[in-house]
Image (cartoon, grey):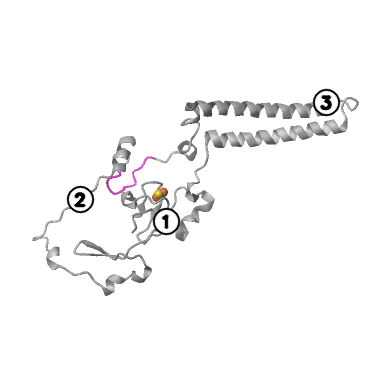
Amino acid sequence: MDDACSHRLAPLSQGRIDQWGRLQCVYHGWCFSGSGDCKFIPQAPRDKLHVHTSKRACVAVYPSFVQNDILWFWPNTDPLYKDIHLSKTPPYIPPLDDLTSYAKTTLVRDIPYGRWLTKYGGAQVDWGTKFTGDLQPTPAREQLLDRYWTHTINCSSCSRAYKSLNVLEIIMQIISVASIGIAAAAKESVMSIAARYSLVFLALLCFMASRWLSKFIYKSFHFHDYDHAFC
Ligand code: FES
């Protein structure tokens, strides 16, 4: 198949075969069957798990054929040539199957990512051989995509912005509660109906703004779910 992942064109030759026999891209883990169909996108949102069925997620495959332990392929991905090996069979060389006359050597290419994974993964993942399924349990999404402990707390500008926005959120909540309290407690002779409605409106406005700010703070400084699959 093409040595280019349909996601971000990473070289699929640096991927690995997972326990289901699928080729898994080394970058973001998209998985492909032998016919080039995308079978799994780890980052797909739970309510859109079918996204891998899109044609755009597939990888082009070349018709291939093994004979005499040699892999032959036809350099054209047009489905027209899918069964080309039936009409254009590669030459059969009987002596190559005679192991008394020929020795075979198996080579394994050590890829840079393998070394990188071994170094930073504490050799917990054996990327160099066929995957056996022995992986550490996947941490929770919130832990994997955590922003607070991995960045916010260590970045002076983010940390300052985080504190200021939290203070702003609290101020808006205080204004909201105080406005409602004043509107409810003030006597009719002291406060007009219009002023009372204005205070209630202000309370609602501050409440909604503080809710929005709270979500913004969480998304920007704590955790933002990964939606790279659609990029
Ligand atoms: S480049 Fe292959 S999964 Fe992202």
Q: Which structural element holds mark 1?
A: strand
Residue 49 x %, y %? 49, 53
Magenta portion: prevailing SS class: loop
Residue lying at 48% horizontally and 49% vertically, measured from the top left: 229
Tell me whether the residue at label 1 lies in contact with that at label 2, contact meaning CB atoms closer than 8 angstroms. Answer: no
Alpha carbon separation for disc pair 3 and 1: 63 Å
Q: Please provide percent x and percent y for residue 31.
A: 39, 53
Mark 3 closeness class: few <14, some 14–19, many ≥20 residues within 10 Å: few
> Does 186 appear in magenta?
no
- Name the residue tied to disc 1: 39
**Cα–Cα span, label 2 and label 3:** 84 Å
Please provide percent x and percent y for residue 60: 37, 61
* Label 2 with label 3: CB-CB less than 8 Å: no
Q: Is 89 rendered above or below residue 41?
A: below
Judged from the image, the secondary structure of the residue bearing numbered disc 3 is helix
Q: Badge 3 is on which residue?
A: 185
Q: Position of residue 171 (x, y in %)?
A: 68, 26
Q: Which mark is residue 107?
A: 2
Q: What's the amino acid at mark 2?
A: Leu
Q: Residue at x 84, y 31 (%)?
A: 195
Above or below 80: residue 7: above
Q: Earlier in the sequence, mark 2 or mark 3?
A: 2
- Number of the label disc, if any, that sits on residue 15: none
Task: Report how far apart the C-alphas of labels 1 and 2 lie in the structure.
Answer: 28 Å
Residue 21, above or below 98? above
Q: Quadrant of residue 2?
A: bottom left
**Part of the protein shown in magenta:** 126-136
Q: Is residue 45 left or right of residue 103?
A: right
Left or right for 113, reference 58: left
Is tag 3's residue or tag 1's residue first in the polypeptide sequence?
A: 1
Q: Quadrant of the N terminus?
A: bottom left
Amino acid type shown at disc 1: Lys
